[in-house]
Amino acid sequence: MNILQALFFPPEQPGGVSSMVPYVLERFQRQGWEMELFSLPKRIRGKGTEDVAFTTFDWRQYAGSPVVDKYIQTYKDYVWWTKLRLRKTYDLIHAHHPIAALVMKQLYPQTPVIMTVHSSYERELILNGKIAEGGPEQAFLTSIYGELEAKVDQLLTVSHSFKQYIADYVQDPERIGVIPNGFDEKRFRPSPHENAVPQLISVCRLVPAKGLDTLLRACAELKERGRPFVLHLIGDGDSRPELEQLAVQLNIYEETIFYGYMLHPEEFMPFFDVFVLPSRAESFGSVFAEAALCWLALVGTNVGGIAEQIENGVNGLLVPVDDAHALSLALEKLILDPAYRYHLARAAGEKAKKTYSLNRVIRQLKAVYEGYRK
């Protein structure tokens, strides 16, 4: 079979789609499958001019919103770039973004298109304060799920909780398949070590949705109780200035290191002790599986895909969203008890290897792809 993996922007950022699809492609190619990757370069802006029309709703009722207008222009750009660059046909297209899926089905109407919904753009925008809940932008973006259901041949997503979320916006949610993200174990090299001071690490975009303000407040409580730690924050984003200022105000700036963006944080992670990310929402939370494969103890919030990865007290600790005190107590428990920390880390690593291995993803995708073999 000749299969196209259609991404949105190039896989340059760590986490999620970027940390999986290129490895999936490489593994399939090594097994003799004909497969290639396609994406829209970030330099392509404002090139597309063709009209956009959806069959399940009229997007023009939302025109005038900067978010909606940018989405539609990006759709037009994806059409322009696809027509310019793709000259061959495919037996199957697997898209990893709604724009990629809808454009591919528009330009290749006779080709089966599978779509994996990896995340919720509207929830991210709401949590990051970019759009209002219940506003026209949310209505537009959630209508896209119904358009996908009507157009593509098969919908997949990455967690059961996210499938439940999408269910409110489609006609037949039972047709949505679930294939969690998978990771190549060879990328992760756990390193036995002893840190005199417990080292906490978080890897994410620095935006409100990730709850890092809650993490800083929890760490301030740890310091007030005399618990030693160093907090390492890998990533960048709009919230960095505010977070740095908050660390100063909370008197934990000396204990907190802001690294900025890092291409391969998994090479850095094995030398830490605890991975913590108090997200306010996560469709899957790939970085938790990556941290588990590095043998770090996990602390996360009881939401979405995080709660599917972590069984509280068995392979990590879960706390409520926006509860800095509960988060500080969970971190304190791991700081004070290295043996318990080690036990949770090993359990997390074993579950990640068993449940989120790249081999499992390849087997599941093969079964889906084979269903479309002519």
Image: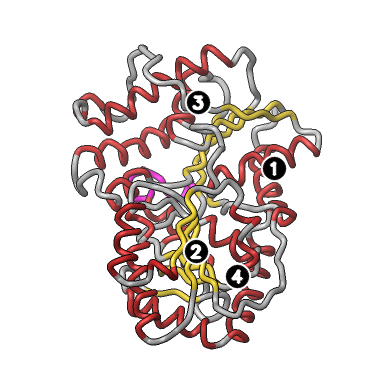
Between discs 2 and 1, the one toward the N terminus: 2
**Magenta span of residues:** 166-176
Q: Quadrant of residue 212?
A: bottom left
Between discs 2 and 4, the one toward the N terminus: 2
Q: Which residue is mark 3?
A: 40
- Specify whether 253 is left or right of 118: left
Q: Amino acid at mark 3?
A: Leu
Q: Are marks 3 and 4 in contact (CB under 8 Å)?
A: no
Distance from the alpha carbon under mark 3 to that under mark 4? 35 Å
Label 3 environment density (alpha carbons within 10 Å; few <14, some 14–19, many ≥20): many
Q: Tell me which residue sits at (68%, 44%) in the image.
A: 367
Distance from the alpha carbon under mark 3 to that under mark 1? 26 Å
Q: Amino acid at mark 1?
A: Lys
Q: Tell me which residue sits at (46%, 78%) in the image.
A: 331
Q: Tell me which residue sits at (46%, 54%) in the image.
A: 204
Q: Tell me which residue sits at (55%, 44%) in the image.
A: 17
Q: Which residue is mark 1?
A: 366
The relative height of residue 5 versus residue 47 in the rendered view (above or below) is: below
Q: 91 and 223: which one is in front? A: 223
Q: Secondary structure at mark 1?
A: helix
Q: Amino acid at mark 2?
A: His
Between discs 3 and 2, the one toward the N terminus: 3
Q: Amino acid at mark 4?
A: Leu
Q: Which residue is mark 4?
A: 296
Q: Residue 245: give x, y in percent of width and height.
A: 30, 60
Count of number-bearing discs = 4
Q: Which residue is mark 2?
A: 232
Q: Residue 270: give x, y in percent of width and height.
A: 65, 65
Q: Secondary structure at mark 4?
A: loop
Give the mark toward the camera: 1 or 4. Answer: 4
